Amino acid sequence: MIDMVEYRGGWLKIYSEDPNAYGLRVRGDSMWPRIQSGEFVLIEPGAKIHPGDEVFVRTSDGHNMIKVLNYTREGDYQFTSVNQDHRPITIEKHRVEKVEYVAGILKASRHVDGDDVDEVRV
């Protein structure tokens, strides 16, 4: 059980049962209006993912993105965006380092600076 998730430069006020959960700040508009630039997402690496889930993707060439998992098929992943201005992306599985579940979307106001945290219960 985690009451707050550490984010570089502070903490995110959110509950998670995944001891490896972490937070990321989002930049860009590919998931707009569902996720807005400047908001945070809670990533739970231990959760099983399914088509239709929002996921964090890291590719072997260092690209990081939040997308919707469309499908996993014949050695490929396909990811889509909520914002229809962005086309679907198909990536070979061997080029993907991680695909992890987005368990929550947090407004920027849920971020607490590291200096403002007195105690964190884990």
Image: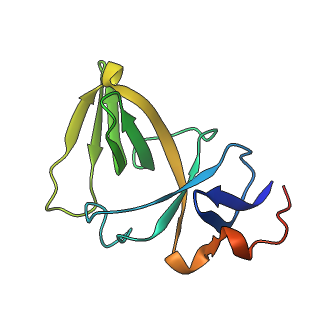
- Residue 103, position as x, y percentages in the image: 57, 55
Q: Is residue 47 left or right of residue 16?
A: left
Number of numbered discs overlaid on the protein picture: 0
- Residue under the image location 71 percent in, 46 percent down: 18
Residue 38's quadrant in the figure? bottom left
- Residue under the image location 68 percent in, 58 percent down: 5
- Residue under the image location 57 percent in, 38 percent down: 48
Q: Is residue 51 above or below residue 8?
A: above
- Residue 61, position as x, y percentages in the image: 30, 30
**What is the residue that sits farthest to the bottom in this orientation?**
109
Q: Foreground residue, 4 or 9? A: 9
Residue 34's quadrant in the figure? bottom left
- Residue 45, position as x, y percentages in the image: 59, 40
Q: Foreground residue, 23 or 91? A: 23
Q: Quadrant of the C terminus?
A: bottom right
- Residue 110, position as x, y percentages in the image: 60, 76
Q: Quadrant of the N terminus?
A: bottom right
- Residue under the image location 68 percent in, 66 percent down: 14
Q: Foreground residue, 119 or 93? A: 119
Q: Is residue 66 left or right of residue 89?
A: right
Q: Foreground residue, 30 or 28? A: 28
Residue 121's quadrant in the figure? bottom right
Q: Is residue 31 above or below residue 57?
A: below
